[in-house]
Image: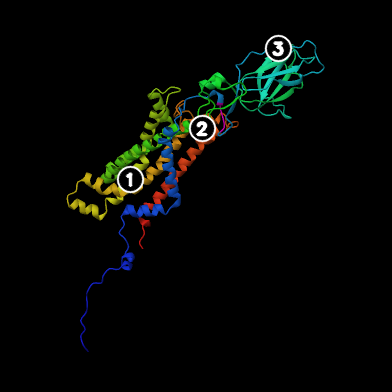
């Protein structure tokens, strides 16, 4: 049996061997890989980025003052018809009278004279033989069997006056006018007459020139059609551009929703780190104070801060809202950080650092807080939608940002008043609030899974 020399010559590395070797990944690199694998979290991240672009760059692109009113386009729906017909200046109308009564107990032959426009709608009818006066109603729906006549426009106390001119907040839509006879005591007689009027949008040449729709009054003649100012998402009940108000409202809502969580999460980090590292009686004392703060009613303190800062009706309530959130919302973060510090301070590397002479501040800032960053980021991500929703709720009930300062919550409060007739005024800010809260919640859920060290890949 012969001895054979063993060859210990190292092999040259091949591409296959290099591919089979698992790359060394840091904690944050591994977390980013797992976050990218979560489609919902990535989509939510892009939505958050789009909201920030909408908030920051939007007003620079869509340079419209959110407080400017367009009385020609009040409560205009998104992408609605913007055509307006040029007409002459308004001239007063002499209401016709009739001296000979006709048979019947209610106004007969109710009709619209001249073309109904946003300048005026003019009605005439035949005089009944029993009425001593009339009451005129206007509705956006036909009366039907329930005889719901709508808004009472005027009481006419002369039986000879058998005409009426409506100039009250007219818009380009169909109206239903009803006229009821009145007896000598002012009570309505049985029966009514109804007529519909399809109102068209008109504007004078001088008004078109003032709005910048034409260059000179000589460029148009009565009957010409011009296009009114574009409002992509429509207007509110004062004719203000809804897209501009949503952009500026996003600045207020996201400012409160991001600044307040950053401040009170930072306070919670400092407070919880001190309590968890010191431990003992100091820890118990600090956490009992945190429990006391949790028990304080938020809405009551919000009212007290508004009184303290002398916030009156119509003033912006941003400052007291921020202070109330910061003062009352930090204990949740403090509890989470304290729990993490209590578990980390017993770790071996902390003991080794102490033996090497590391001071308390170095241990907390260099080892403990960085190892709690996962929990802190997740807490911050979930705190942002909570703060946005709180701002929207407080503004909705009139305790937060007050008009005319736009915010999504105050816009929802304004849109609620006209929800049945112009739902876009409520739906637009409500949809943005829902999308923002949902995106941050899904992103926080993805970060929680990605930053969980127990879910790191081992293959």
Q: Colour scheme of this structure image? A: rainbow
The image's mark for residue 157 is 3
| Residue 205 can be seen, yes or no | yes
Does 114 appear in magenta?
no
**Residue 166, image x, y percentages:** 65, 19
Secondary structure at numbered mark 1? helix
Q: What stretch is highlighted in magenta?
A: 73-77
Q: Say which residue appears at 26% left-offset and 49% top-offset.
A: 367
Residue 187 in the image, given as x and y percentages of width and height? 72, 16
The residue carrying mark 2 is 412
Answer with left or right where residue 413 lies relative to residue 196: left
In the image, farthest residue toward the bottom: 1
What secondary structure is marked by label 2?
helix
Q: Which of marks 1 and 3 is in front?
A: 3
Image quadrant where one finds the C terminus: bottom left
Q: In which quarter of the image is the N terminus?
A: bottom left
User: Which mark sits nearer the N-terminus, 2 or 1?
Assistant: 1
Alpha carbons under labels 2 and 3: distance apart: 42 Å
- Pointer 1 residue: 337
């Amino acid at each position: 049996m012969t001895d054979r020399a063993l060859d210990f010559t190292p092999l040259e590395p091949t591409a296959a061997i290099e591919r089979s070797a698992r790359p060394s990944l840091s904690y944050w690199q591994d977390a980013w890989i797992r976050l990218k694998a979560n489609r919902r979290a990535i989509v939510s991240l892009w939505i958050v980025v789009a909201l920030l672009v909408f908030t920051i760059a939007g007003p620079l692109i869509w340079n419209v003052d959110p407080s400017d009113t367009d009385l020609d386009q009040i409560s205009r729906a998104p992408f609605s018809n913007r055509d307006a017909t040029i007409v002459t200046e308004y001239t007063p109308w002499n209401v016709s009278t009739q001296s000979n009564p006709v048979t019947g107990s209610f106004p007969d032959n109710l009709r619209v004279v001249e073309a109904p426009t946003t300048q005026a709608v003019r009605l005439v009818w035949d005089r009944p033989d029993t009425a001593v006066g009339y009451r005129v109603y206007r509705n956006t729906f036909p009366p039907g069997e329930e005889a719901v006549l709508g808004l009472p426009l005027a009481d006419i106390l002369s039986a000879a006056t058998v005409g009426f001119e409506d100039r009250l907040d007219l818009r380009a839509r169909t109206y239903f006018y009803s006229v009821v006879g009145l007896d000598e005591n002012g009570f309505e007689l049985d029966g009514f007459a109804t007529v519909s009027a399809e109102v068209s949008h008109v504007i004078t040449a001088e008004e078109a020139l003032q709005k910048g729709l034409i260059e000179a009054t000589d460029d148009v003649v009565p009957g010409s059609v011009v296009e009114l100012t574009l409002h992509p998402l429509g207007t509110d009940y004062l004719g203000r551009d809804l897209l501009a108000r949503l952009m500026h409202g996003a600045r207020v809502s996201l400012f409160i929703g991001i600044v307040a969580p950053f401040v009170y999460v930072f306070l919670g980090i400092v407070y919880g780190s001190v309590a968890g590292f010191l431990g003992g009686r100091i820890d118990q004392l600090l956490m009992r104070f945190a429990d006391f703060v949790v028990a304080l009613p938020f809405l009551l303190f919000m009212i007290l801060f508004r009184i303290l800062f002398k916030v009156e009706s119509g003033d912006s309530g941003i400052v007291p809202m921020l202070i109330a959130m910061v003062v009352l919302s930090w204990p949740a973060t403090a509890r989470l950080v304290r729990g993490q510090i209590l578990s980390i301070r017993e770790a071996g590397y902390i003991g080794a650092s102490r033996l090497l002479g590391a001071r308390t501040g170095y241990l907390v800032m260099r080892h403990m807080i960085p190892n709690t960053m996962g929990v802190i980021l997740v807490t911050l991500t979930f705190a942002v939608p909570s703060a946005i929703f709180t701002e929207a709720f407080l503004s909705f009930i009139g305790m937060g940002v007050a008009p005319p300062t736009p915010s999504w919550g105050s816009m929802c409060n304004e849109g609620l008043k006209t929800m049945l007739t112009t739902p876009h005024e409520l739906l637009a800010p409500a949809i943005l609030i829902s999308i923002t809260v949902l995106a941050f919640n899904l992103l926080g859920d993805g970060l929680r899974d990605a930053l969980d060290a127990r879910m790191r890949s081992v293959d």
